[in-house]
Image (spheres, grey):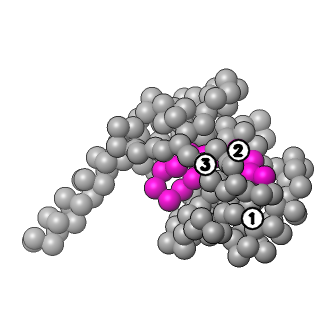
């Protein structure tokens, strides 16, 4: 009986702690060589890292990089090989065309993140950070049961700066 109560209490506290932006501790800092990033826990979010940034991530405790850019947008092979030389896992999960994020895409990025969260810090990036912020808003809504308004507000705090990206997140949330 006590064990069941403890489990229920833990679940209730966990759900409550994920339900509003006031409990999502965000931080803005510089990682890599000079990359401006946002942080929640051991997960970092940014625009495109430079080659110098990629080389210094390992010494800062990063073990995984998830790139949301389409390989046609940049020299993906160079980024991948630079990270692999440093012993960092690299994943390219291109954002859907026309910023049409879906539950399946949100889950795909989240499951990749979950598989590696115990190995060290993770960086999720795109070119400007806006696609990352769209994913974050969808993720907080879908996986943390955050309200639509709080999901948008948190995404804005973590890099949602372009009107087109904000509209894409709102379009996703509108269908929920």
The residue pinned by badge 1 equals 55
Q: Position of residue 66 (x, y in %)?
A: 68, 59
Of the two numbered discs 1 and 2 on the same chain, state the one appearing first in sequence: 2
Is any part of residue 6 visible from this angle?
Answer: yes
Q: Secondary structure at mark 2?
A: loop
Image location of residue 75, percent across then percent down:
89, 55
Along the line of sight, the residue nearer the viewer: 141 or 128: 128
Q: How many marks?
A: 3
State if disc 3 and disc 2 touch (CB < 8 Å). no
Q: Is residue 49 magenta?
A: yes
Q: Quadrant of the N terminus?
A: bottom left
Query: Which sits earlier in the primary sequence, circle 2 or circle 3?
Result: 3
Q: Position of residue 111 (x, y in %)?
A: 57, 63
Spatial separation of the CA atoms under disc 2 and disc 3:
12 Å
- Vertical relation: 66 (above or below) 120: above
Q: Compare marks 1 and 3 and give the one earlier in the sequence.
A: 3
Determine the residue positioned at 70% across, 44% down.
Answer: 47
Could you tell me which residue is drawn at 24 percent across and 53 percent down?
12
Bounds of the magenta segment? 37-50
Residue 132 shows up from this direction:
no
Residue on which disc 2 sits: 47
Q: Residues within 10 Å of mark 1 (few under 14, many from 20)?
A: some
Q: Is residue 109 magenta?
A: no
Front residue of 22 and 52: 52
Question: Disc 3 marks which residue?
Answer: 30
């Amino acid at each position: 009986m006590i064990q069941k109560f403890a489990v229920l209490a833990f679940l209730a506290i966990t759900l409550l702690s994920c339900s509003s932006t006031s409990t999502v501790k965000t931080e803005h800092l510089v990682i890599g060589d000079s990359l401006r990033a946002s942080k929640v826990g051991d997960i970092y979010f940014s625009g495109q890292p430079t080659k110098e940034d990629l080389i210094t991530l390992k010494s800062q405790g990063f073990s995984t990089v998830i790139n949301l850019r389409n390989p046609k947008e940049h020299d993906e092979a160079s980024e991948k090989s630079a990270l692999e030389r440093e012993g960092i896992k690299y994943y390219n999960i291109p954002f859907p065309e026309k910023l049409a994020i879906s539950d399946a895409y949100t889950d795909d990025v989240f499951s990749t993140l979950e598989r590696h969260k115990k190995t060290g810090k993770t960086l999720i990036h795109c070119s400007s950070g806006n696609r990352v912020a769209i994913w974050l808003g969808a993720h907080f809504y879908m996986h943390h049961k955050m309200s639509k308004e709080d999901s948008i507000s948190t995404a804005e705090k973590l890099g949602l700066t372009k009107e087109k990206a904000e509209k894409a997140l709102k379009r996703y949330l509108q269908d929920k």
